[in-house]
Structure formats: C-alpha cells, structure tokens
Image (cartoon, grey):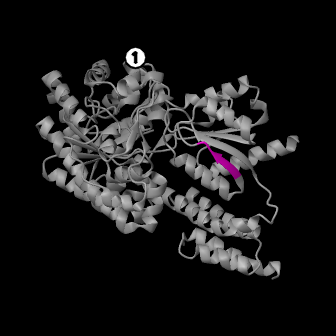
Amino acid sequence: MYSPLERFLIAAGLQEPDQVPACPFATGHFISWFAGIPEQQAVEYWAGDYRKKLSSQLTVIRAFPEVQFWPGIWPDFGIAPEMTAFGCEVSFPKNSSPAVRVPAIKSIEDIDKLRVPDPKHDGLMPLYLESYSHMIREIPKELRSNYGYCQWAIALGPTDIVGLSMGYDKFLVSLYRYPDAIHKAYKIVTKAIITWIEAQREVIGSDLLTLIAGDADCFLNPKQFEIFAFPYLKEICTKLKKKGNVVLYHNDGDTTHLLDKLKDIEANMFNYGQVGEESMDTALVKRKVGDKMCLIGGLNPIGVLLKGKPEEVDYACKKAIFEGGQNGGFILSTGGAMAAHTPNENILAMINAAKKYGKYPLSLDLVRG
Amino acid sequence: MKPTNWKIYTEKLSKAIVELNDIEIKKLAKEAIDAGVPAQVAILEGLAKGMEIVGEKYEKKEYFLADLIMAAEIMKDAMEVLEPHLKAEKVPKAGTVVIGTVSGDLHDIGKNTVIAMLRSAGFEVHDLGIDVPVEVFVQKVKEIKPHILAMSALLLSTMPMMKEVIDALNKESLRKNIKVLVGGRPVTPEYAKMIGADAYAKDCVEAVKKAHDLMKEILSKK
C-alpha cells in the first residue's frame, strides 16, 4: 500500500503505481471558500497571515485524508510575491485573488532597469519565505512525508512574469516589435525564477516538488513559443531537475497548439488545461507528450467538477483514466484549480473513480464504454 | 480615381493586417488616401476586412491571442493615418458600446481583445477599464447612453458582480434602454441567461457577432 506521496512520485516518474492517483488541485479560491471565509471577503485569506492560510488549508486536506492535494500547504499569495518583487503595484481586491494593478515596465526602455530580485529583500518574497518557515514548523511531520505538503516550491513561469510586468497587451505586441528587449526580459526573469525556487529550497530543506505556473504561454503562437518561452522554460526545468526537483509545469489554458514543442521543456509533469468547459483532449496530450511527461489533469474544474453531477464526474474520470492512464505516468486532477462551491460529492466521485477504474493493470473492459 | 480601382489599395491594407505587416501599414494607408480612396472605404473594405479574416483564423486556431492583439495594434496604426480624413465624411457607426471588467477583477486581456475587434467592426467603444464598481457602470450608462453594455470577468468569484450591475440598472430603470452582453472564462450562456443578460460571447470574435445581432434587435424595434 503506497502513501499518496509515493503514488504521486511513481506516476511522476512515468511508472504505474498501484492505482492512478487522484490529486485535487486547490488554491485560495476554493480553499478560502471551503474554510468558511465569505467569497466577498476572500481577501482575509489572500492577505491573511500564515495562520489563516494554514488553518484554511488544513481544513481542506483533513476533509479528504485519502488523497494528496497539490500544492497542499504553502503561503498562498497568488501572483503577489514575484510581481511585487519585480516592482509591480499589486492589489488585493476584497473578493478575489491578488492581481497586478500597475505594471513595472511602462515603456520598452524600462526593461533595461529590470533586475533579478533578492528573495530576502524584495516585495512580498521575504514574507512568503517567513510564512513558509512557520508553516513547515507547525504542520505534523507525516503531512510532509506522506503527502508532500510543505515541500512544494512555486513560481510563475517566465512568460507570465514578463507579461504581467508589462501588461499583456504591450507584451504581446512587443514580441513582434522589440524581440531583443523581450529576450532580455526573459533572461532576467529566468534567473529570477531559479533564484526564487532556490530561496524556497533553503526554507523547505529537502528535495522539492516544484510548480511552474506558465498559463500565459497559451497566448503565444507556436513560433513565438518556440523562440521566446521555450528556451527559457527548458533552462529552468533542466537546472531544477539537475538539483533533484520534480518539476510540474502547469498551464490551465488551451495549449493544444504548443504540444509539439512543449514536450521538450524537460519538465517531469504537465498539468494540461481546458478548452471551454471541457478538458483538453487527454488522448491527444498523452500521444504527444505522454512519453516525456507525467500528465496530471483530465477534468475541467468548472464544466465537470463544479457543475457536473457525481455520475458525470465519474464518467469524465473514467474517460480520462482510459485515455491518460495507460502505461502509467498519469494523475487524475483538474486542469486548473478547483472553483469555490465545488461540491464535496464531486470531489469524492473523483477520488472514488480513481479507485474504481484506475487500479493497475488497467482493465480495458472496465473503462470501455 | 474610379471606385473599381480602390480595390488595389483596400486589398493591400487588408493583406497587411492579415500578414501582421506593421512596417508597411502606415505607408499603405497614406498611399490609399493619396490615391483618392475615401478613408471610410479604406477602413471598412481594407482594415476591417483584414480584421475579419484574422478573426476567422483565430476561430480556426490558425492564429492565437498574440496575433489577434498584433493585428489590432496594426489597425490602430493605420487608423492614425486614416482618422483625420474621416472628419469630412459621414461614417455610420455600427453601434455604441460601454465595456469594463467587473469590480474586484483586474484582468483585461479578454476585454481588450473584445474592444479591438468591436472597434475594427465599426463600433464606438467606451472602455471603463478594470475593477469597475457597479455605480460607475450605472453612471456611464446614464452619461453615454450606449446601445450595449458589455461586461467581462475572468474569475468565478467576481462573476456575480455582473448580476449586481444588471440589478442596479433595473433599479435605476435603465435596463430597458440597453442590451447587456457578457463574457469571460467562467461565464456561460446559462449563467448569462440566469442573471438577465441579453447575450453571451465565448470570445472576441463571437462578441462582434453578438453585438451585431443585438444591434439588429434594437433597430428592428425602432
């Protein structure tokens, strides 16, 4: 019998554990709501101290002790640590997650002023690190060893940081007009991401699970992705993997057009996103990248997990396991973080479906139809 | 010049938009004006046509968000050349739209692409920006008296603000005078219906189609 973390790591290594792991993906939107914070006051969670975040996250993970949530327990400030460190003005709205109000780069010349932030001094990074060290001290040890909690280092991807630092409109136009300046920004941001992950490693003090959130890559066309994002993502993933990190690349948008290149970014795992109210095509993603990266996803967090009935969740899970689970390297999850109001019975339906249909060796008879 | 020869110039403009050729665009716009092509024709049969093709390519997943934003930027450049020449001409507008991202939501990429596409389709668009309070939406509807109020939300947590805006418009007896168009990642046609919006658009290309449909409804009732 494997622990949830063992199952997760076997799948991450492209192998078959005893069953397809089910790992719900939850961030502040779901966590704060589940912990009873009114949605119109979600800022109490996002801007709250580590105790608020820790107690909210513990409420969630204790409700579903069978499975490993990801990231689980961490100082969830959304995009704020990196973006404040890069000099953006970040707002904490009352009813939602932090967001950039004023980008740091106002003209293309400002790229020359970009510096790799010092995680010990810049923006909210020091508060994040301090909060993390408190959380690590306070959680029971078995939550780290059995579930991998407080072992995740998390960073925004290079395209997200460059894009948010400039504002996406300006960034996307600048890809055409100022390619050299954009490359310069990517280079600085790449160094910053590696430095930021290393600073988290110092606090965490062990081998790491690393989450790179690269949602904005889906805005790029395939050529732009290859020229701009790809080399930097590959550099980040390669360097982190060499240091023993298990790297999970997350993108909750539609990356179907990028799959041919994405497969070579050297991440261990790929949390693939959605097309409208459905997941991206799991069979296609498996075919294109499944021999290089463990797939984690298969369910649309809104169309299926929030709005579906338990039997619809069950069917979607069965389909995802059938398409993604062959030969291992698959974890059942949502392609983006779960939404507030996601019913408990749907989360349970997902957990039960992984047990019901995901036992290795997979029974084709069971999952067919 | 004869109108039949305008096509040479409008086709060049359209092609420059589709090929995302930002180097030539101002030159091509100037050439069209110098050759006697009315600015309105250059816009509608050149630039707007090009944007329409870009929209089709986006829907077919041949073009992506970055391409769409770039095409809109190139159109903006061309408009700098053509707009001063419009003053002398009477240009019919497709309609007037007030648009914003709802309170608590600071995301603007979706809204901005909708604005770009609406403008290229001839709509007069008033952008209220991001994190727009309910009362500002109401105030601007009173001031501008648009045909359409468009609202965007990226987050499930901010989406309910759309309903608050519609409720506030009802309260102020402004709702019957305008059409409401909503969109954004978590928004669905069912949700749009539930909160009392008139239309839902899944992306910027559909937003233009829906805006045209809403205008037809408005005009048919006049």
Q: Quadrant of the N terminus of chain A?
A: top left
- Residues B85 and A327: in front is B85
On the image, which quarter does residue A260 sit in? bottom left
Residue appearing at x 34%, y 38% in the figure: A80
View extreme (left): residue: A205
Residue A347 can be seen, yes or no: no
Q: In which quarter of the image is the C terminus of chain A?
A: top left
Q: Helix, strand, or loop for circle 1?
A: loop
- Residues B96 and B60: in front is B96
- Residues A211 and B86: in front is B86
State the image coordinates of residue A219 (x, y, percent, origin top left).
Answer: 45, 54
State the image coordinates of residue A120 (x, y, percent, origin top left).
Answer: 19, 40
Q: In the image, which residues are magenta? A: B124-128
Q: In this view, does B153 lie to the left or right of B124?
A: left
Residue A74 can be seen, yes or no: yes
Task: Give yes or no for residue A340 being in the magenta stretch.
Answer: no
> Which residue in the protein does label 1 denote?
A36
Q: How crowded is mark 1: few (under 14 residues within 10 Å), some or many (20 or more)?
A: few
Q: Is residue B142 left or right of residue B205?
A: right
State the image coordinates of residue A239 (x, y, percent, origin top left).
Answer: 18, 55
User: Chain letter of disc 1?
Assistant: A
Position of A210 relative to B73 (above/below): above
On the image, which quarter does residue A114 sit in? bottom left
Q: Is the magenta stretch mostly helix, strand or loop?
A: strand
On the image, which quarter does residue A102 sit in? top left
Residue appearing at x 35%, y 56% in the figure: A288
What count of labels does the image hold?
Answer: 1
State the image coordinates of residue A34 (x, y, percent, origin top left).
Answer: 39, 20
Residue appearing at x 62%, y 26% in the figure: B164
Q: Which amino acid does label 1 sit on?
A: Gly
